[in-house]
Image (cartoon, rainbow, N blue to C red):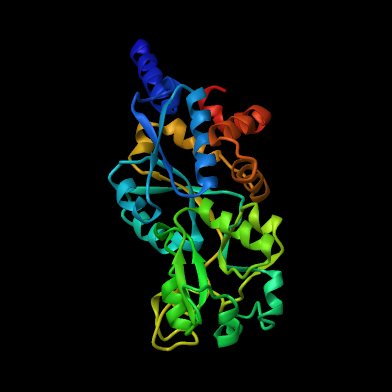
Amino acid sequence: MKLRHMLASIVLAMMSLPASAGGVPESNGTIKIMYSTWSSINIQAQIAGQILQKLGYTVSYLPVDDSARYPAFENGDVAISMETWATTQKAAFETSLATGKIVDLGSLSAHAKEDWWFPSYMKEKCPGLPDWKALKDPKCAEAFSTPETAPKGRYLSGPVDWGGYDVERVEALGLPFEVVNAGTDASMFAELKSAYERKAPIMLWIYSPHWAPAKYDGQWVEFPKYEDACYKDPKWGVNPDKAYDCGKPEGWIKKMGWAAGEKKWPCAYQVIRAYDLDSKTIGTLVGQTDIDGKKIEDVAKGWIDANEPIWKKWTTCGGQ
């Protein structure tokens, strides 16, 4: 009888241990981490992936359009994303989360902000800025025009898959601007660099954390402050007939995952939950790739090599 009780106790004790205690990796399957069209998500994907590889996991990186990520995650085609921004993904993220097929893996310390941005030298040609109502003045709009858009102003938006409702915002607020989408964030910031050096007119999508708002003197346009009702209820705001008559939301940058993946790789998911970088660190890392021209893989490895005491605290479940 005593032996039977002893064996039962041992079995119960083993059942109470985390899955990782039986060995990491818990599954030989490949953890697919999302890549996208901006540098910081890819740098953080590499940092997370290289750390997981040190624990013995097999990792691959899968390019996914930002607008198409949710079906991919819900179907298990990709397992982890290191960045999901409230600024453009809040509603879609919450809808997908409600299906139970994805999981919220926690927020980074970094604070997300992105919206229309202009260099400070443009205030001479549009002195009412940063108030959005200044953009309704045809003279101000023309100051931001190009031969292709004149007399309308030109707004350089991000790649199409970023979303952001810029066309809807222009229509709802009655702005005499034409939205032009950049092909990549690299081309967008290359155009900013060229315009800034020539003091040429430019209005574009800038986001933070990023090196650009620290490097260049400028301001975000001050649109009506975002509320959830702005995107959902046309009666909200300055235009009673259209939604999106406000600025973009700001706030969290979350990590997200395929829900079923947490059962396959519980320790890996625990590492991602613990993972955290702040805005300054992310902006610095992006500058190393976008300005200094370093490879993303090398930037990630450099951070890992220089910050072992930090990331080892994230990996305790893997015996590190």
Residue 212 visible in this rendered orientation of the protein: yes
From what the image shows, is residue 139 above or below residue 55? below
Q: Name, please, the residue furthest toward the front.
A: 147
x, y percent for residue 46: 51, 35
Q: Quadrant of the N terminus?
A: top left
In the picture, measured across the screen, residue 260 lies left or right of residue 224, that is left
Residue 206 or 308: which is nearer the viewer?
206
x, y percent for residue 288: 64, 41
Q: Residue at x 43, y 43 (%)?
A: 35
From what the image shows, is residue 288 above or below residue 153? above
Q: Quadrant of the C terminus?
A: top right
x, y percent for residue 177: 49, 78
Residue 65 or 22: which is nearer the viewer?
65
Number of disc labels: 0
Residue 147 or 231: which is nearer the viewer?
147
x, y percent for residue 212: 64, 55
From what the image shows, is residue 83 above or below residue 4? below
Q: Residue at x 53, y 40 (%)?
A: 44
In the picture, measured across the screen, residue 291 lies left or right of residue 240, that is right
Quadrant in the rendering for residue 34: top left
